[in-house]
Amino acid sequence: MRSMGHLVVLLLVAFGTFGCGDGDRSTSGMEQAAGTAGSSAGLGSSGSGGSSSSGTAGEGGAGTGGTDAGGTGTITPAAEWASWSMPNPQSTGLPNPQSYTDNGDGTVLDDVTGLVWQESVDAMQYTSASAAQHCLDQGGSWRLPTLIELASLVDYTRFNPAIDDVTFPDTPVIVPAVAFLSSSPFLIEPSTSWIVDFSDGTAAGNVVTTAYSVRCVDGSGTREPSEHYSVESDGVRDNGTGLLWQEPMSESDYTFAAAAEYCPTLGTGWRVPSVKELQTLVDRGRRSPAIDARFFPNTRDVAFWTSSPLASFAAYAWRVDFWTGYALNDSVDSLLGVRCVR
């Protein structure tokens, strides 16, 4: 059974963010509020936000619209790309195994991304505005991390907390401290920001006035490469992560097990992406679908399977919703899309 504390986080995410949605769209993840993976009423409902505005992620050139650590303490959506390989938990056998170096000064270097993180987190909780200022107050180039940076810390093979708790030993596991704020605005609702729930790794939106935990990052930011994607003969290459993505993708739907069987049929090396890898394709400046349609023109406005099971709940696995970009979990028997990677 999930703890009642985790249930509170789910309800806060659902009702705090989407209270004014139009109610005509819902997601199937988190379908049981207690026990296994739950669904909160209204989660994924479309809000009143409307379409993407110009100048946001995916519309501009390299780094357009971004501010570095010396500016506002945030990195805006146009700079929010993973310009590094996404770490995967060592036990999965996937590329770029997670690795950290303790700097001995209260900071931790992520050996894969090159980002430096606070080892310990402040016991205080912050709203989005106060969180950005808190990181600036640390001096140097400390700032509030973007959603994709924060997601890079998640270890989806662990549960409560879903992070390397040897490297980051004081990650809180008590609600609401288990959820961490990012600097990434949520496109659908102007009053919301992206958060990562480190009980399991859920990435969702929540109101900016809700206070959550903060782990500051020290790094130059995740700038979009001047040529983010390159079209190759057998797919689309992400020049930041180095991953090659299937394009065009299958129009069929699969169970979790069937997706794992399908991808290798494309040829040597093709597989279902991990939940962390699939999140690197999300364009948080777009929705319906939340991806750069110039390179992925036929992306369906649905959820896609990842290869990542939900830790401690064998009947559920992770998927990424390309309507908004949510990372949630779903029953392994659900029929979802799949975009293979190698």
Image: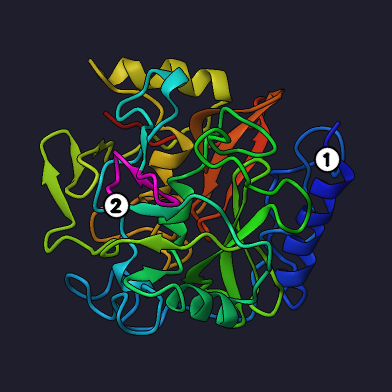
Q: CA distance from mark 2 to mark 1?
A: 33 Å
Mark 1 belongs to which amino acid? Gln
Q: Position of residue 102 (x, y in %)?
A: 39, 40
Badges 2 and 1: C-beta atoms under 8 Å apart?
no
* Residue shown at the point (16%, 48%) measured from the top left: 239
State the residue at coordinates (79%, 33%): 36
Above or below 131: residue 318: above
Pick the front one: 169 or 215: 169
Name the residue located 28 percent from the left edge and 21 percent from the top edge.
Answer: 266
149 sits left or right of 224 in the view: right
In this rendered view, identify the residue nearer to me: 240 or 258: 240
Q: Position of residue 341 (x, y in %)?
A: 31, 32
Give the residue pinned by disc 2.
296
Locate the C terminus and report the quarter of the image it occupies.
Answer: top left
Image quarter of the N terminus = top right
SS label for mark 1:
loop
Mark in front: 2 vs 1: 1
Q: What percent of the width, then of the height, locates residue 52?
A: 43, 77
215 is higher (above) or lower (below) than 54 = above
Residue 300: horizontal and vertical position, in percent?
Answer: 45, 50
Crowd around label 1: few <14 · some 14–19 · many ≥20 (10 Å): some
User: Which residue is the site of mark 1?
Assistant: 32
> Magenta stretch: dominant SS?
loop
Extent of the magenta region:
103-114
Q: Earlier in the sequence, mark 2 or mark 1?
A: 1
In the rendered view, does 173 fall on the left or right side of 134? right
Q: Is residue 113 magenta?
A: yes
Rendering quarter of residue 247? top left
